[in-house]
Amino acid sequence: MLGCLLLLGLPFGLISCLDSGGNSNDPVTQLLKDIETIDNFLDSNGLTAEEDASGIRMVITELGTGLPAMLTNTVDVDYVGKLFSTNAKFDEGNVKGIVTTYIAGWQIALTTLPAGSKATLYIPSYWGYGNSAQGPIPANSILIFDIEFNDVVESPQELQKLAADTTAIDDYLVSKTIDAIKVPGGLRYVITELGTGATPTWYDRTKLKFAFKLLTDDTKIVIQAEREPSAEFYSRVIDYIHGMKIALQKLPAGSKATLYIPSGLGYGTQAATDQGVTIIPANSNVIVDLEFIDIIEP
């Protein structure tokens, strides 16, 4: 929930068909088969990939310095799409669109890859077109995309909202006489205990404890959890909301801090829900009491 888990605009419309074709003929078996095929290929060719719990693999040739996209962001991406089975190119070009309009594999990759990165994505068929053929793409095809993730394109409205949220947070801090570290982009944080461990990078796996409160009601905890790596959730720095991503890369393991996060670095225009109940409304500034326990080796 705290991280962002079809390709529209290409000549034949790379739209996800998971709903229409991904839930028959045992898609989970096909997914596991595809993951094994991809991993064997990477191993046999001596390629090192960042692995996602979904099964997507990313061979990063240039790591960007920007934040990954949120699902509601517009992105600018150059790409070449190829079939894993034959290495035949089926499309190439540039797209500028909202992340949720792309195939699920792109949604996962673009929300776990820093903007400015160049990478080759290996996408199991489950996260592409499942068991439905799409133009030159046969059913159950593993897809390869060479991409340049040029940028996350922020709209004037998003920039105005960030400025307003940052002002609201700064006013709150002044009213509470809190002296916080200010980060360009809106994050504010106070280190309450400085750890002595290593400082993590994007894909390091972490063990954390955290509690969320709304800036508008700092007396009530709305989310409280402890996270560590598992088969279903890797708990990497990059898997958390943007404000936590930024803060974790500034904190040594063993640290405790309070983060003041504008909505654009939190859940943005999407609400956080639990069993259909809204826990954090859309466009909410949040306070996160964070305990960064350790980096966990995979």
Image (cartoon, helix red, strand yellow):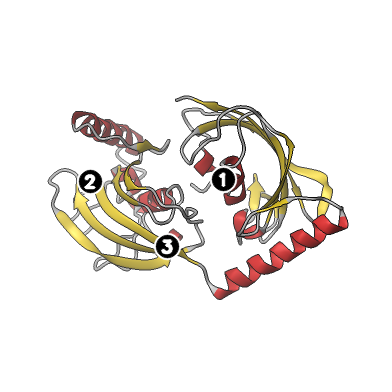
* Horizontal arrangement in the rendering, residue 3 relative to residue 138 (left or right): right
Camera-side residue of 260 and 91: 260
Residue 73 showing in the rendered view: yes
The quadrant of the rendering that contains the C terminus is top left
Residue 224 showing in the rendered view: no
The answer to which quarter of the image holds residue 254 is top right
The answer to which quarter of the image holds residue 148 is bottom left
Task: Tell me whether the residue at label 3 lies in contact with that at label 1, contact meaning CB atoms closer than 8 angstroms.
Answer: no
Does dot 1 land on a helix, a strand or a loop? Answer: helix
- Horizontal and vertical percent for residue 142? 24, 44
| Residue topped by disc 1 | 245
Crowd around label 2: few <14 · some 14–19 · many ≥20 (10 Å): many
Residue 181 position (above or below residue 205): below
Mark 3 or mark 2: whose residue is earlier in sequence: 2
Q: CA distance from mark 3 to mark 2?
A: 28 Å
Q: Which mark is residue 61?
A: none
Task: Please state which amino acid type lies under the numbered disc 2.
Answer: Ser
| Residue topped by disc 2 | 141
Task: Please state which amino acid type lies under the numbered disc 3.
Answer: Asp
**Which residue is located at x 81 percent, y 58 percent?**
172
Camera-side residue of 25 and 105: 105
Crowd around label 1: few <14 · some 14–19 · many ≥20 (10 Å): many
| Residue topped by disc 3 | 151
The quadrant of the rendering that contains the N terminus is top right
* Horizontal arrangement in the rendering, residue 74 relative to residue 50 (left or right): right
* Horizontal arrangement in the rendering, residue 21 relative to residue 241 (left or right): left
